[in-house]
Image (cartoon, rainbow, N blue to C red):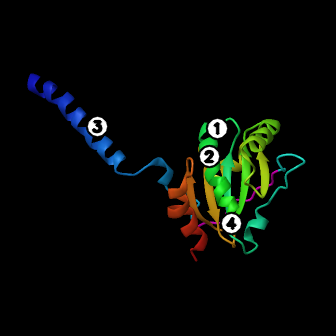
Amino acid sequence: MKRVFYLIPIVVVFGLMIAFAVFLRQGPPGYLPSQLVGKAAPEFTLPPLDEEAQSFTRAELAQGRPTVINFFASWCTPCRVEHPTLQALAARGDITLYGIDYKDNPEKARAFLNELGNPFGRINEDRDGRAAIDFGVTGVPETFVVDGNGMIKAHFSGPINEAVVQGVILPALVAK
């Protein structure tokens, strides 16, 4: 009977090692699938960030042109890291890039964009985080690719970089 008690910790440790190995094989968190991929973007009504910004609606996402939507915030360090990539994406000129400022102070968000540059054609303010909940955002930054019919084609959680642009965003923009 005492031998069984000695085996229990060994079995528990072995089980945890297997669970950890399975977790590691799932890939980086940014590639976790979104439940919305393949579905219509959720309805939302948000105000513009401030008087300098124009807002956008769900209906505008279904007007024939693919759009990249980026949830960001001025207080978000990874948002600062990904910002040069967003600037480069916007500089291409052939991509519609919209932003949604998540649970942020509009003045601080504008200062963030003035400091780093504004890659967004339109910017909404999601002060209470309701639209983020509808999109399934778990934290900023998160990026969605929406096709010209308003369907979500791709989702990336975390700061994007050139590898994400080439491997996730651009393929989703041309996917039928």
Q: Is residue 33 left or right of residue 6?
A: right
Total tally of numbered discs in the picture: 4
Q: Which residues are magenta?
A: 38-46
**Is 16 in front, or is 6?**
16
- SS at mark 2 in the image: loop
Please provide percent x and percent y for residue 107: 82, 37
Label 1 neighbourhood size at 10 Å, few (<14), some (14-19), many (20+)? some
Residue picked out by circle 1: 76
Q: Single out the mark in the foreground, 1 or 4.
A: 4
- SS at mark 4 in the image: loop
- Label 4 amino acid? Ile
Residue picked out by circle 3: 16
Please provide percent x and percent y for residue 84: 63, 49
Q: Single out the mark in the foreground, 2 or 3.
A: 2
Question: Is the Cβ of the residue at disc 2 closer than 8 Å to that at disc 4?
Answer: no
- SS at mark 1 in the image: loop
Q: Which quadrant of the structure image shows residue 79?
A: top right
Residue picked out by circle 4: 95
Between the residue at mark 1 and the residue at mark 2, the CA separation in whole angstroms equals 8 Å
Outermost residue on the right side: it is: 51
Please provide percent x and percent y for residue 17: 26, 39
- Label 3 amino acid? Leu
Q: Is residue 109 left or right of residue 20?
A: right
Between the residue at mark 2 and the residue at mark 4, the CA separation in whole angstroms equals 19 Å
Label 2 neighbourhood size at 10 Å, few (<14), some (14-19), many (20+)? many
Residue 143 appears in the rendering: yes
Instruction: Return the mark for residue 141.
Output: 2
Question: At x 64% / y 41%, what residue is drawn?
Answer: 80
